Image: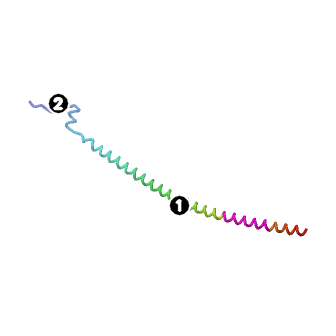
Amino acid sequence: MCINSSSIPRCPLHSALRHPRPPKRQNLRVGRLCRRRRLLKEAKEKKRVRAEMEIKNLKLYMKNRSIIEENEKLRKKALLLHQENQALFFQLQKKLSQEQQRHQSLI
């Protein structure tokens, strides 16, 4: 007696065994690949941002150094002007005191 395959009831397990699905590892590999690509892209972006920040930092450092140098030059110039102002003030006082002495001697 021959059993006809059409007479066998179809169950999900039987159909799964007849037509196997592709293993899910392929999807896992694709997922890993996508994740790896994303991580590499993020790492590349972080590296680019870090390089930009270093360039900005260097520019700000150089600008700060030039401001400090300019400040030192202005400080020295201010000190010289202050000394010159004091010298002129003492000369003026000396001249005024001499004129007062002359004026008193005339009286």
- Residue 107's label in the rendered image is none
Give the x, y percent position of residue 25: 27, 43
The residue sitting at the left extreme is 1
What residue is at 48 percent from the left and 58 percent from the top? Answer: 55
Query: Which residue is at the front of the view, 33 or 50?
Result: 50
**Residue type beneath disc 2:** Ile
> In screen coordinates, is 104 left or right of 25?
right
Give the x, y percent position of residue 3: 12, 31
Instruction: Identify the element where label 1 is drawn.
Output: helix
Between discs 2 and 1, the one toward the N terminus: 2
**Residue type beneath disc 1:** Met
- Residue 8's label in the rendered image is 2
Q: In the picture, which quadrant includes the N terminus?
A: top left
Give the x, y percent position of residue 86: 72, 64
What residue is at 73 percent from the left and 66 percent from the top? Answer: 87
What residue is at 24 percent from the left and 40 percent from the top? Answer: 21
The range drawn in magenta is 78-94
Instruction: Identify the element where label 2 is drawn.
Output: loop
Eye-nearest disc, 2 or 1? 1
**CB of mark 2 within 8 Å of CB of mark 1?**
no
Disc 1: which residue: 62
Query: Which residue is at the front of the view, 81 or 55?
Result: 81
